[in-house]
Image (cartoon, rainbow, N blue to C red):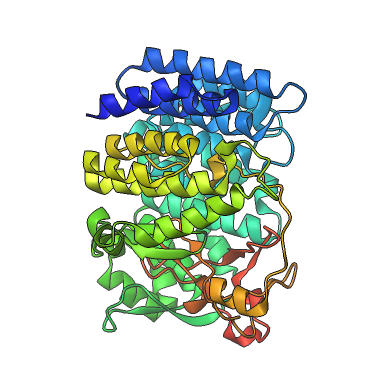
Amino acid sequence: MLTDLLLAASKQAEQSEPAVRAAALMHIARVMALSDPAAAIKMLEQGIALAETIERDEPSLLLRNAVALAAAVSAQQALPLYEKYGKVGSLPRSVIVLVNNLAQHGHVADAVAYLRNPLPGDRFPLHFVNNLERECRDDETRRALLELAIDEWKKPAAREPGPEQRFAVTSFAGLFSGLWNLLPREAAAPVARELAGAALRMQPERREYPLTENPDDPRLASDQELELFRLIPALQDLAPDLARSILEAHPGLAAAINRFPLGMRSVWDGQSRYEPARDDVVLIGDEELMPIADALATGFAEAFRRALETLANDANSESPNAAHKECWPSAREFRHILFKAGSHEGMAAAKHLSRIPDPDLRLFARIELCAGIAGLPELGGLTTQFHERRRHRTLSAAEIEEMFGSILPGIRCPKCAWTPRAGHIWICRCGHHWNTFTTLGLCPECRYQWEITACPQCGKESPHQEWYEDRGRGAH
């Protein structure tokens, strides 16, 4: 039973060295919060207190990870911890780590409450607003989120030129187009008109935007029409004269609205829904993806092979990883495998634990197995930071190509000139993984057209079209 697995993890944690015990207690608390919130808070506090004795001078990755884990258990414990450790150093987008984990673990009202009154220096993450909206369970919370987003959108900083601001405004427009009817008409109409005005002032990039995979469905002719397509249903109710004039001037857009009268909502309603048994994937190492059906059929053989290779590097006696085991890349890979196995195989997935030779990493994987069985969300990269200290040899060109695929010619980061390879993967806001340059930034799953692409090398974002040395190939 799940309780037995969790109990075994708790007993092993108590016998582990302090850093492993601290991390394990906090991870166990996340799972325990589903059935016994009071006991989970107590265990979380024990883990935090122990972590604080390990790193006295400067908060370690252990304590930064604790912020996300605390958010999964209780906002009352997470917010003081976030104020103390979550904003230390150069942790990017730390507010997203906080509010995302609050929302994903059922504390979305607490996430919205924090965004209403954040700490100095934190701003409402306008570009992340649609992720938060997906976690809302009632219209009252959705309306509160939309009102906060409108307040942020109205600030001058949101209108400054730059790719991040443009992406944030695009995200806001998507949120508004889905929730505008939760607002009083007198509040929604000015927003709809201003968004439409901004779209009409765009210099349109001529390119076909397919809304579905059906070749017979209408296609939009520019990024401008794509923005207007999102807004037309709201405009037809709030500003019908403006909607009528826009459709008269854009016959292709009018054909698309005639086919999809509710805009993107009609498009999404016609698409197949995400089915974990069919659509889920397992990450192999850092880059490769395997359909869950293939992983299950092979007993996660390839994923374990890669994870064991990573463990060999972490535990290399000549140049061991000096970070806490909680932060080892191999710990993350084993956790991921057991989480996926637990999600799809249930208790039977416990058979995989014996394949993990390191007892501490087996402990972490056991806890994540429990999380998968319990139906919790998987903790992603933003919640676990890795700190490696090891000597690296330079990989040969052949080794690099074997690991990441061939270089994509004519494409490079506008900021640092890094060149992507065929095996590099980006993640859409819908959760789909793919190489964004194979589709010119169009997500094959939800058909969202990405206008901004982040560089895995330097971490900076640039308009997607600027990645192409021949700008004529750009998607937008």
Q: Quadrant of residue 215?
A: bottom left
Q: Is residue 431 above or below residue 335?
A: below
> Quick check: 224 above or below 317?
below
The residue drawn where x is 28% and y is 67% is 260
**The N terminus: image quadrant:** top left
Residue 72 at x, y percent in the picture: 45, 29
Q: Is residue 286 above or below residue 23?
A: below
Q: Is residue 324 left or right of 174 when viewed as pictured?
A: right
Residue 288 appears in view: yes
The reply to whether residue 284 is visible in this rendering is: no
443 or 313: nearer the eye?
A: 313
| Residue 226 percent coordinates (x, y) | 45, 69
Q: Residue at x 74, y 55 (%)?
A: 391
Tell me which residue sits at (32%, 40%) in the image.
372
Residue 100 drawn at (x, y percent): 49, 38
Which residue corresponds to the image point at 61% horizontal and 59% vertical from the top-left?
A: 166
Residue 407 x, y percent position in the rendering: 61, 80
Residue 408's place in the image compared with 87, above or below, is: below
In the image, 163 versus 395, the foreground residue is 395
State the residue lying farthest toward the right: 57
> Which quadrant is the C terminus positioned in?
bottom right
Q: Left or right of 55: which side holds 105?
A: left
Q: Quadrant of residue 353?
A: top left
Query: What is the quadrant of residue 258 in the picture?
Result: bottom left
In screen coordinates, is 220 left or right of 265?
right
